[in-house]
Amino acid sequence: MMKTEQITPVVGCIIFDCDSVLLNTDTIIISTLLDLAEEYGLTIELDEAVWLFSEKGVEQNIIKLNNLIGTAVPDNFEEKIRKNIYQELKYGLEPKEGVTEMLRMLKVPFYIVSNLSR
């Protein structure tokens, strides 16, 4: 009978999704969407909006918004919301609680990726 050795897996690196994992991007994106939605007469509390719009892409959220207001937003709405989101993220983005300390403690290389448009 052949003797087998137990091999302990080694982590070479960790890849983090930045959006809503390390940074609270959802709140900023949803708040920006709500600000623009008010221009079309739609007022939603933040808690309800988080439930409706969290973890969905801008395109999906625009479709949802169109359904809620009962009409289509203008063609330039997506460009406008992306511009506003970018401005808010540029100046108002903070890591989630404990993220900075956790990243400092890592003993392996790590990468941070995002699916937000540049």
Image: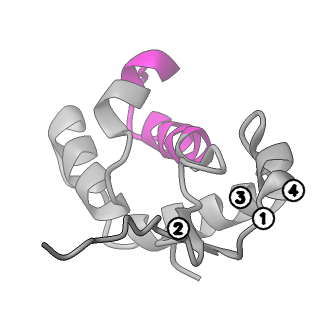
State yes or no: residue 47 in magenta: yes
Q: Which residues are magenta?
A: 27-49
Alpha carbon distance from label 2 to label 3: 10 Å
* Identity, as a three-letter code, of the amino acid under mark 3: Leu
- According to the picture, the residue beneath numbered tag 1 turns out to be 107
| Residue 37 horizontal/vertical position (percent) | 43, 40
Query: Which comes sooner in the sequence, label 4 or label 3?
Result: 3
Main SS, magenta residues: helix
* Identity, as a three-letter code, of the amino acid under mark 4: Arg
- According to the picture, the residue beneath numbered tag 3 turns out to be 89
Mark 2 touching mark 3, by CB under 8 A?
Answer: no
The circle on residue 82 is 2
Alpha carbon distance from label 2 to label 1: 36 Å
Q: Secondary structure at mark 4?
A: helix
Query: Which comes sooner in the sequence, label 2 or label 4?
Result: 2
Mark 2 touching mark 4, by CB under 8 A?
Answer: no
